[in-house]
Image: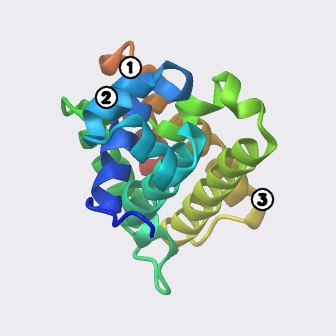
Amino acid sequence: MGRVQAFDTDMVVRAARAVFWQQGYEGASLPDLERATGLGRSSIYHAFGSKRGLFDLAVASYLAEVIRPRLAPLVAETVAESAIVDYFVGLRAALMRRGAAQNGCLLINTAGAPVANDPAVAAVISGYRADLQRALATGVAAHDPALSGEERDQLATLLTSLVVTAMTLVRVDPAQSGAVMDAALRLLAR
């Protein structure tokens, strides 16, 4: 007879996500994950198959609960003219608050780690970047409909690069991360 699961999977995945977000995949030890989740090693392996299985669910959770809600106004059926400015104002505020956002972006952090050499992980990271750029392009188009498609795409590429830069810098230089967000807002105000 199989064991009965006595924990909330979503809560465990969120707790593990916090560890991976702060320490990275390679830096997150099994004892760290055990402490954060309240599960023993055998329960982690039984429920998730491996540390990697738990990481994959943490990344899916991050996309669903952190990334997609922030991008939602930029990918709505009708995108408000102010949606892209609101995105950058909100992202700047989040990056300047103490807490999880000062860990940067789980996916951007992962892009610079050895686990990113795994084709499945690389595909998730690449997909996130493409989704971000598409959302920003849609926001740019709503914000300034007079731009040509080429101008819109160029601005979206530049804004995507600024988001990646800010998310990378926030771990080591939060003030500079804020300055990068300010530069993005100045671009949009031109």
* Residue 27, disc: none
Circle 3 residues within 10 Å: few <14, some 14–19, many ≥20: few
Dot 1 falls on a residue whose secondary structure is loop
The image position of residue 129, as x and y in percent, is 65, 49
Residue at the image point whose x is 42% and y is 40% from the top = 186
Query: Would residue 59 be visible to someone looking at this image?
Result: no
Identify the residue position indicated by label 2 in the image: 102
The image position of residue 174, as x and y in percent, is 32, 20
Identify the residue position indicated by label 1 in the image: 171
The residues tagged by marks 1 and 3 sit, at their Cα atoms, a distance apart of 33 Å
Outermost residue, front side: 1
Assess whether mark 2 and mark 3 are in contact (beta carbons under 8 angstroms): no
Position of residue 130 relative to residue 96, above or below, is below
- Residue 30 falls in image quadrant: top left
Which residue type carries mark 3?
Glu
Assess whether mark 2 and mark 1 are in contact (beta carbons under 8 angstroms): yes
Dot 2 falls on a residue whose secondary structure is helix
Which residue type carries mark 1?
Arg
The quarter in which the N terminus is drawn is bottom left
Q: Which of marks 3 and 2 is nearer the N terminus?
A: 2
Identify the residue position indicated by label 3 in the image: 150
Query: Would residue 18 be visible to someone looking at this image?
Result: yes
Q: Earlier in the sequence, mark 1 or mark 3?
A: 3
Residues 180 and 76: in front is 76
Which residue type carries mark 2?
Gln
The residues tagged by marks 3 and 2 sit, at their Cα atoms, a distance apart of 33 Å
